[in-house]
Image (spheres, rainbow, N blue to C red):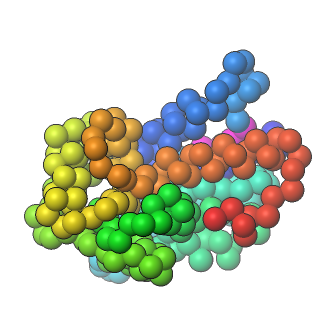
Amino acid sequence: MKDFFTVIGGMGTMATESYVRILDQRTHAKKDQDYLDYIVVNHATVPDRTEYILDHSKPSFLPPLLEDIKQQSLLKPKFMVIICNTAHYFYQELQDATDIPIIHMPHLAVMTMKKQYPKAKKVGLIATKGTIADHIYEDEIKNAGFDLSLGDQAIQDEVESLIYDDVKGKGVADKDKYHSILKTMHDKFGCDVIVLGCTELSFAQEQAPDHEYDVIDAQSIIADVSIDLAKKVRNGEEIDFSKIY
């Protein structure tokens, strides 16, 4: 297969499945050949990202991801996407290991937010403790000129429950819990926009989009960008990856 892209996933599997489902649904294919060419690496046994970020004595998720990147680079995809926000903790190390462009999902999400909501002042971030601790989104949001709210411990506990107990643990999204989190971030903490900084939260958004709050869904955004880039690759267009943001 030529002119394809690679999806580094499995972190978690339900979130990766959500990305692939969105990707295929939005391609608007009328026949088999209209769909995109891609490889999905569902590396479910990658060590827990949050555990390592919070405690470096835990197994690191860098070695298996480096192995994935190097293996896929041998096949020469046109670009790669990593369907896990927290895994971008090692983004630079992973990009340095290959000459294949890796799309930076958190950066892409925040740059999209800046264009879509230029008048927003306070941005809420809901994510795993690992993503909060590694400051990937925090730095991106502040550098884009927004005030940031992380909510409080009660909200963090609800977010962790939604991610780990519901989506990862049961393969379902608790609609009421998800909507309650968004409402609290908006009403109590005054957030104009809420960034879904975990792909399990993107899964919840896919399953329960019927709410009134403005959210930035990094997985949805990278799916749209994947489609756009893949179609350009298929058409033989030259892509300047430094300008996609």
Q: Which residues are magenta?
A: 37-41
Q: Residue at x 38, y 66 (%)?
A: 120
On screen, 162 above or below 125? above
Tell me which secondary structure the magenta stretch mostly adopts: strand
Image location of residue 51, percent across then percent down: 31, 69
On screen, 45 above or below 55? above
Image location of residue 9, percent across then percent down: 51, 50
Q: Residue at x 65, y 72 (%)?
A: 95
Image location of residue 164, percent across then percent down: 24, 52
Image location of residue 214, percent across then percent down: 35, 52
On screen, 158 above or below 166? below
Tell which of 214 and 216 is nearer to you: 214
Q: Residue at x 76, y 69 (%)?
A: 99
Q: Is residue 164 visible?
A: no
In the rendered view of the protein, which quadrant contains the N terminus? top right
Residue 155 among magenta residues: no
Tell which of 194 and 155 is nearer to you: 194
Is 179 on the left or on the right of 213, as rendered? left
